[in-house]
Amino acid sequence: MKGLILKDIYSIRITQKTYVLLFLFLCVFGYLMKSPGYVGTMCIVVFATVVLSLFNADQYYHWDTYAAALPLGKRIIVRARYMLIIVMTLGLAVFTAIMTGATAALLGMSVSEQVISSVSMCMIIPIFSGIIIPVIYKLGVEKGRVIFMMLFLIPFLVLTLLKDLIQGTAVEKLLVNLQQNPNGQVIIAGILLAVSILVLAVSYMISIRIYSNKEF
C-alpha cells in the first residue's frame, strides 16, 4: 500500500511548483486582504482539484487495468487512495496552521483563533473527498467533475439562503457567539472532525463495494 500512496504523491510532485507558487500567492493575498483564514478556505479548492487530477491521471494512463494485473487486491487500491486523503489533510492542516498563524501575527490578530478557524476549514476536505470519490468510482471522472462543481455551488447557495432566513434570530446570535468565542471554535472544529471521520468511513465502505464490482 505504501507504493500506491507514493505513486499518487509522485503524480502530484509533477506539478508541485505550481502548487507551491499558488499557496504562496494565497498567503500574500490573505495578508493583503487582512484575512488569515482565506488561506485555509482556498486550500480546500486547491485540494479538490488535486483529487480530481489523481483520478484523471489514473484514467489517462489506464492505471486500473494495469493494477488488475498486479498482485494487489481492489480493497488495498481503494484503501491507499483514502489513506492518501488522510495524510494530505493532516499535512495541509499543519501547513495552513503555520501560514495562518504567521499571517495573523503580522496583522496583529489573535493567532490561536485564526489557526483554529483555518484548521477547522481543513476538516471539510475529508467530507468533500468522501462524497466525490465514490461518485468518480461509480460514474467516472467526467461526470465526477459535474458533481465537483455542484459540491461547491450547492453549499454556497444553501448558506446564502440560510443566512437570510436566520438573520436577526437567536440562531444567528448563537452562531456568531460560537465563531467569536475560542471555546465555540473548538466545538465547531470537533464537530467537523467527527463528521469528516464518519463521512470518510462510510465513503470508504461504499467505494470498496463499487470498485470490487468493476471489471477492468
Image (cartoon, rainbow, N blue to C red):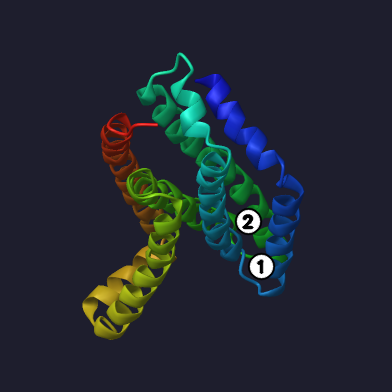
**Considering the image in quadrants, where does the C terminus appear?**
top left
**Mark 1 Cα within 10 Å, few/some/many (few <14, many 20+)?**
many
- Residue at x-position 74% and y-position 65%: 28
Residue 123 or 99: which is nearer the viewer? 123
To which quarter of the image does residue 68 belong? top left
To which quarter of the image does residue 106 belong? bottom right
- Residue at x-position 28% and y-position 70%: 174
* Callouts 2 and 1 close, C-beta under 8 Å: yes
Looking at the picture, which amino acid does disc 1 mark? Gly
Q: Is residue 6 above or below residue 147?
A: above
- Residue 169 locus on image (x, y percent): 23, 82
The residue singled out by tag 1 in the image is: 30
- Residue 132 locus on image (x, y percent): 38, 51
Helix, strand or loop at label 1? It is helix
Looking at the picture, which amino acid does disc 2 mark? Thr
Cα separation between marks 2 and 1: 9 Å
Image side of residue 202 versus residue 127, left or right: left
Q: Is residue 164 above or below residue 82?
A: below
Q: Is residue 84 above or below residue 95?
A: above
- Residue at x-position 28% and y-position 78%: 162
Q: Is residue 83 above or below residue 104?
A: above
Seen as rendered, the residue at the extreme top is: 71
The residue singled out by tag 2 in the image is: 100
- Residue 30 locus on image (x, y percent): 66, 67
Image side of residue 81 versus residue 8, left or right: left
Residue 112 or 194: which is nearer the viewer? 194
Helix, strand or loop at label 2? It is helix
